[in-house]
Image (tube, rainbow, N blue to C red):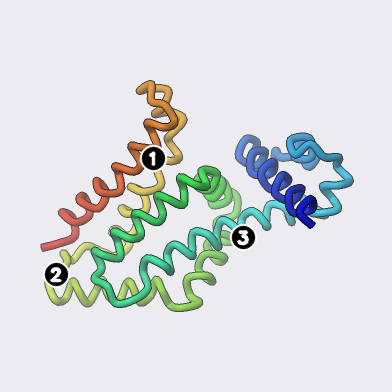
């Protein structure tokens, strides 16, 4: 049983690398098998097609990120407290799973409707995002928050969190930053992003 789990884990790790390097269209099952150090017949035993393998990775990424949304945005805490939790949990999750931003970005470019529908279904399970947006409007009406349009608010937050992880290969080379140093920067950004949003959102 452990051997089977290890083989599947090796396949998923290899597939993430190949899909990121070559995109969905350019990825080949043989290349994934070679990267996982198994033969192609073994790969097809676990996943009959490239689409099935890609879908397994995408479902895992969507599940993981939607869990962070639900965890951070549920409950009765004020909007800014929820935002701080979201910044922290998303940053930690991406640090631990660095393939996610590029993988999702590639899927949005390849098949935006598929990604949007998967993410939306997850967030609609408990009305998490809808309730959070209603809470933002309520706090805006109470003049706790500035009347910034909610799409702008969410786009700004997610851009500040995700883009540095996408741009990491460029930044580490240009500024001569080590992986450990960049990880430290991402940790520092948690408070930096929160302070930026606090100045932007609160009255």
Q: Which of marks 3 and 2 is nearer the N terminus?
A: 3
**Frontmost residue, 26 versus 174:** 174
What residue is shown with label 3?
A: 59
What residue is shown with label 1?
A: 164
| Crowd around label 1: few <14 · some 14–19 · many ≥20 (10 Å) | some
Which residue extends farthest right?
41
Query: CB atoms at circles 3 and 2 under 8 Å apart?
Result: no
Q: In this view, does 132 lie above or below 63?
A: below
Quadrant containing the N terminus in the rendered view: bottom right
What residue is shown with label 2?
A: 144
Q: In this view, does 135 lie to the left or right of 172?
A: left
Helix, strand or loop under label 2: loop
Helix, strand or loop under label 3: helix
Q: In this view, does 22 lie to the left or right of 98?
A: right
| Crowd around label 3: few <14 · some 14–19 · many ≥20 (10 Å) | some
Quadrant containing the C terminus in the rendered view: bottom left
- The residue depicted at 33 percent of the width and 62 percent of the height is 151
Query: CB atoms at circles 1 and 3 under 8 Å apart?
Result: no
**Residue 41 percent across, percent down from the top left:** 89, 46
């Amino acid at each position: 049983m452990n051997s089977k789990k290890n083989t599947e884990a090796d396949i998923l790790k290899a597939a993430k690398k190949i899909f990121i390097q070559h995109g969905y269209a350019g990825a080949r099952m043989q290349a994934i098998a070679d990267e996982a150090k198994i033969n192609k017949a073994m790969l097809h035993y676990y996943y009959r097609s490239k689409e099935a393998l890609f879908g397994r990775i995408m479902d895992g990424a969507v599940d993981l990120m939607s869990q962070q949304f639900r965890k951070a945005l549920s409950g009765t805490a004020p909007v800014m407290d929820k935002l701080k939790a979201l910044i922290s949990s998303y940053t930690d999750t991406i640090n631990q799973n660095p393939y996610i931003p590029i993988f999702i970005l590639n899927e949005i470019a390849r098949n935006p409707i598929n990604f949007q529908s998967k993410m939306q279904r997850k967030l609609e399970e408990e009305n998490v995002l809808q309730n959070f947006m209603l809470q933002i409007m309520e706090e805006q009406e109470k003049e706790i928050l500035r009347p910034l349009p909610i799409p702008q608010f969410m786009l700004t937050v997610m851009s500040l969190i995700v883009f540095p992880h996408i741009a990491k290969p460029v930044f580490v080379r240009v500024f001569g930053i080590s992986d450990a140093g960049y990880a430290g920067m991402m940790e520092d950004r948690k408070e930096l992003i929160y302070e930026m949003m606090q100045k932007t959102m609160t009255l």
